[in-house]
Structure formats: C-alpha cells, structure tokens
Amino acid sequence: MRMLKFLSLVSLVGAVACGSSSPSSTVAPTPTPTPAPTPTAVPAMFADPSSSFSTADVLDAQEQILQFDTASNSLIWKATGQSFAGFPVLDSVFIRGDKFFQVRFGTKNGTSHAYFTEAVRGTICDVEVSGGTVLINPTDIPVPHS
C-alpha cells in the first residue's frame, strides 16, 4: 500500500511540474531549406537564311553538340549537360559579347548543320570540356558544303 501511495505522489508531482505556468522554452523544428528553382534553359534557335533549316544544335570540329541558353547566356555542353556562362547570342548568329564566334551553316553528306566557328577566319572551332572549364581551340577545318 505504501508503494502505491508513493507512486501516486510521484505521478502527482510530475503532473504539477509539467503543468506549471512558468515559461518554458521550446525549440521549433528547423525548416528544411528549399533549393532555389533552377531556371529553365531556353536554347537559342539558329536559322539558315538561305534555306528553311533551323536548329538549336551547333556542331564543333569533332561534331560534338553545343547549345546556347538565352536565359543564362551560357554554352551548354550536350554530352554532359554542363553549362558555361559568358556566351550570349547576339544578332542571331554571333556568340559572346565581343562577337568572336559565329554560327555558320553548311551541309555534310546532304544533311544541313550549324557549326561553331571563329567569326573572322570562318573555320570550325574545336571545343573541349576539361576540369570544369570549356576550352575553345582554332582549327583549319572549313564549314563543309557537300
């Protein structure tokens, strides 16, 4: 019987202590951060003025596919989806603010393509991605017309 009274007393003390009117601190759960939405890429469309051909895919010297995102002014390396800032499309054919690169149209084996070229020389550039950077090298490869 004594044990029963003791347990009743402990329960009563615990109830009074938990129900006291003194302020208590409660920690609100930390909200889960929501990542910022990734802007949707808007690929530039390049249209051949001498035909009805248009495309978002631009080929380099190795026929690797590039695209240019007009929303972020970036080059997109299609093989991996990596994006590199600093490549705005100007006047629908020039690439970068200095207009150093240009998209030119050609045909290979009767199929139309857009090519990434140097604006002045007109030769197709070789583009590589290495160590998280994009490397653009000149070549002597002309835009094909076969």
Image (tube, rainbow, N blue to C red):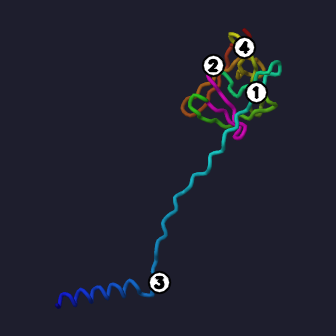
Q: Are marks 2 and 3 in contact (CB under 8 Å)?
A: no
Give the residue displayed 16% in from the left and 90% down from the top: 1
In the rendering, at what x and y percent does residue 72 appear? Answer: 69, 40
Report the amino acid beneath label 3: Pro
Per the rendered image, the range of residues in magenta is 62-77
Mark 1 surroundings within 10 Å by alpha-carbon count, few (fewer than 14), some (14 through 19), many (20 or more): many
* Sooner in the amino-acid sequence: mark 4 or mark 3: 3
Q: Are marks 3 and 1 in contact (CB under 8 Å)?
A: no
> Does the magenta run of residues contain 68?
yes
Mark 4 surroundings within 10 Å by alpha-carbon count, few (fewer than 14), some (14 through 19), many (20 or more): some
Judge from the rendering whether residue 64 lies leftward or rightward of residue 104; answer left or right. left
Q: Nearer the viewer, residue 111 or 35?
A: 111
Q: Which residue is mark 1?
A: 46
What's the CA distance linking mark 4 and mark 1? 15 Å
Report the amino acid beneath label 1: Phe
Report the amino acid beneath label 4: Thr
Q: Is residue 16 above or below residue 63?
A: below
What's the CA distance linking mark 4 and mark 3? 79 Å
